[in-house]
Image (tube, coloured by chain):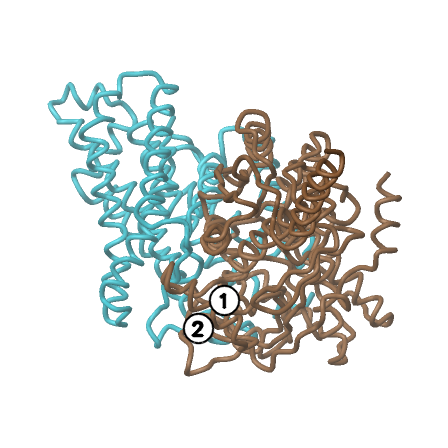
Amino acid sequence: MAARRWWVLLAVGALAAASVAGAGAAPAVRFDRNIKVGVVDTYSGPPAVFGNDALNGFRLALQEINRDGIHGARIEFVTRDERFSPEIGLSMARELVLQERVDLLVGTINSATALAISAFAREQRVPFIVWISKSEDITGARGHRYVFSTTENTAMAGKALAEAVARRGFTRFWLAAEDYEYGHRVTNSFWRFMKRAKPEATLVGQTWWRTGEPDLVPYLTQILQARPQAVFFGTGGAGMANVLRTMQVIGFAQRVPSAIHTAIDVTVLRPLGAAAPEGVFGTTDYLYYYPDTPANRKFVQDFQAAYGSPPGFPAFHGYITAYFIAEAYRKARSLDRDRFVEALEGLRIQTPVGEVEMRACDHQAVLPMIFGVTRRDPGFPHLVAGDPVVLPGRDVMPTCDDVRRAREQAR
Amino acid sequence: MDAAALLGQLVVGLSRAMILFIVSAGLTLVLGVLRVPNVFHGSLYMLGAFVAWTVAEAAGFHPAAFWLALAAGPVATALVGLAVERVLLSRLYHREHLMLILFTFGVMLILNDLVKLLWGPTYRSLVPPPSLQGAVTVLGVALPKFNLVLLAAGPLVAWGLWLFAHRTRAGKVARAAATDRDMVAVLGTDVSRVFGMAFALGCLLAGLGGALVAPTTSITLGMDHSLLIDSFLIVIVGGLGNLWGALVGSLLFGVTQSVGLLVWPQFAVAFPYAVTAAVLLIRPTGLLRSAW
């Protein structure tokens, strides 16, 4: 009798051991509900071009991800239009977290909104991933445990552009920018890194104009008269389109070398068509035609098939954001917010431009920057980045020590 | 600062002033004759630019269609203005000003949403024909050729408005109605028709400004914001309802900004507003005689 009982016990023990060993290979975890993402971004007004592009990239990735699911769950999302206003954006984020009970927040194009939501996310301990807005404060001075960024920021852009321009031997600069958060951030960053790369660089003068200024001819002619050796423009979106158009008409770039972050970007150059000037230095973190790798080609083909036009940089950010979320939940094996944050720290994923790491120390995605000069190309309906150079992310990002110092100072 | 630079900035500032004049002339005309502060004037300016772009696009951006496109903008806004005036606004003239502001504000919201619905949030470019692309060098400054068109358009519009006001019967009645509308009505003139015409003309000028500015800028939602505020300031500085006041105000605005850039580029944005404030401190009713 006793011997038989022993046999039964052994058999049960062996079965249990087998099932535990099997768990290492096949998921024993099954999420009991779907993952819900709250997206806050601008879907009306001029910046909606960027918001919609990011959302399209996000949706494309989710279709791929949800085919297999994550531990039996799918990723769902709801969107809210912040109308480019930090107040509206913050109340939308509040509603998504407190009423809709989303697992995490994603957004937005407006840096001021991103910073406002980030403070709320910290207080509520909700993960928040920033995918378009570029203020370096988001993962720099005002970064924290719950905020992440899957977009390049003004520190990276400023450093990449400053170093590329510094190599060309200019010393007398003019700064010209649009008077808003991003304009100030990117201009300050450019000049800070220019002084670091080239201490003898001097500032001839600076010009600031209002957002939506319709006629930039007086501003640009005045800069020509001051005769600087090179000009940096701190502007984006429709404002930058105005700068580029005016440059082309009065032949500005032929007379003074000019640098603008995202001047080589497709979302800017496509609507301008032939009205864009050649010879402008620019940087961006994503181009649909470069690098011409199988992974990038596949992403571009899928995106084009789904939405009828090639992806801009926001679409790329939306796409990798979805994969970061999916991989982090796969790794966390839990819907717990803190487990998700820990899983996302240091996570590496495969993207259309190669492997991208979510740096653990500041929660900033390590994205490469592409530097190029605008050029006509008969193969494209818009200007392209000529002579592109890829600057690896780790070379253009602030170091972990820089970030730690910035955060201590902010405190 | 040398003389050539100053002259160059003056020329550039003048072409900017001409757009401001065309738009604010429409605003001040409506203010003077109808006593209506038209808040959707800026939306019509934006609409004029979008309509011009659409017509040019429909013609495949053919150079010959460019002028047709520029004409289509103001025609469209005049029709929109006329429809709004005949159907709705004409029933509200006896109401107080606040009601009229609320009404035109409502139309502004509707028009802006309509533009968003029809054209979406992407910005557009309208490229001028090859003969007007590029720049000419005037006094050592590269001035876009198209800005020369603007420099000519401003005085032409001013001359046309003067002819209308002083040489046509409708213009004379409009001026009379601006001074004393009851007396004009007593004399047996259909004031309502004159009002409709003046309103449509004001809206035409908004659309003309938008169409003329379209080749020089990004055509986009929100392009009306800063212009609407500037136009109201110009109208107030010039004297409410006074066409020549709008011209003087526009010149003051455009030129202080471009010349201010030579003096203190970093804060040039503030110059026109500082001048506006100074003028209003000295002459609270505006530089020229107000029609109110």
Disc assigned to residue A266: 1
Q: Which amino acid does label 1 sit on?
A: Val
Residue B220 percent coordinates (x, y): 42, 51
Q: Residue furthest front?
A: A1
Helix, strand, or loop for circle 2?
Answer: loop
Dividing the picture into quarters, in which one does residue A261 lie? bottom right
Residue A118 visible to the viewer = yes
Dividing the picture into quarters, in which one does residue B36 lie? top left
Helix, strand, or loop for circle 1?
Answer: helix
Q: Which residue lies furthest to the top in this view?
A: B95
Question: Marks 1 and 2, how far apart in space?
Answer: 8 Å
Which quarter of the image is occupied by the N terminus of chain A? top right
Residue B28 percent coordinates (x, y): 37, 37
Give me the chain letter of mark 2: A
Disc assigned to residue A382: 2
- Kindly indicate which chain is depicted in brown in the rendered structure: A
Residue A284 percent coordinates (x, y): 61, 66
Q: Describe residue A7's horizontal placement relative to residue B202 as left or right.
A: right
Which quarter of the image is occupied by the C terminus of chain A? top right
Q: Nearest the camera: A274 or B164? A: A274
Q: Describe residue A147's horizontal placement relative to residue B226 as left or right.
A: right
Q: Are marks 1 and 2 in contact (CB under 8 Å)?
A: yes
- Kindly indicate which chain is depicted in cyan in the rendered structure: B
